[in-house]
Image (cartoon, helix red, strand yellow):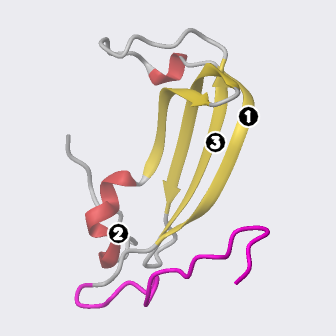
């Protein structure tokens, strides 16, 4: 599969260029105390020429049958129902030779509720 890099894509994003677009897939949600359920995950990654990708993700309960994992399927045939969660944010890769400004040190644990510090 080949694709063309958009003319206005920041060079910092070239390694992530294949992610730009809309993605859809099926999965299973399983949490303690919640009935196991099929889900549809829709993700969109966009850019505006800056050195970051904007993303949004929506997880919906699956109203159609869960596809067989061993068979190929058309994601457009997945029927989303009620929205379970939404998320959005930005991905910004660290430039070569620069450290990611995430954390300088590990997080400090908080004391447990009811304990003395």
Q: Where residue 7 is drawn, which disc sits there?
A: 2
Q: How many labels does the image show?
A: 3
- Name the image quarter holding the N terminus: top left
* Mark 3 residue element: strand
Q: In which quarter of the image is residue 93?
A: bottom left
Looking at the image, is mark 2 or mark 3 nearer the viewer?
3
Q: What residue is drawn where x is 35% and y is 80%?
A: 94
Q: Is disc 1 in contact with disc 3, using a CB cutoff of under 8 Å?
A: yes
What residue is pinned by disc 3? 58
| Range shown magenta | 96-117
Picture quarter with the C terminus: bottom right
Query: Could you tell me what secondary structure mostly forms the magenta stretch?
Result: loop
Seen in the picture, residue 38 relative to 110 is either above or below; the reply is above
Distance from the alpha carbon under mark 1 to that under mark 3: 7 Å
Task: Answer left or right for 44 relative to 11.
Answer: right
The image shows residue 85 at horizontal and vertical percentages of 70, 43
Going from N to C along the chain, the mark reached first, 1 or 3, is 3
Q: Is mark 1 on a helix, strand or loop?
A: strand
Residue 116 colored in magenta in the image? yes
Of residues 101 and 24, the one drawn nearer to the viewer in this rendering: 101
Label 2 sits on a secondary structure element that is loop
Q: Residues within 10 Å of mark 3 (few under 14, many from 20)?
A: some
**In the rendered structure, which disc, 2 or 3, sits on the residue that comes first in sequence?**
2
Quarter residue 33 falls in:
top right
Q: Which mark is residue 83?
A: 1
């Amino acid at each position: 599969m080949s694709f063309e890099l958009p003319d206005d894509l920041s060079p910092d994003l070239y390694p992530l260029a294949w992610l730009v677009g809309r993605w859809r897939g099926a999965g299973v949600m399983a949490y303690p105390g919640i009935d196991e359920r099929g889900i549809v995950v829709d993700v969109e990654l966009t850019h505006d020429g800056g050195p970051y990708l904007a993303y949004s993700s929506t997880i919906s309960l699956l109203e159609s049958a869960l596809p067989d994992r061993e068979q190929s399927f058309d994601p457009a045939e997945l029927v989303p129902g009620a929205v379970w969660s939404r998320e959005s944010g930005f991905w910004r890769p660290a430039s070569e030779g620069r450290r990611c400004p995430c954390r300088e040190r590990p997080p400090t644990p908080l004391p447990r509720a009811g304990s003395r510090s």
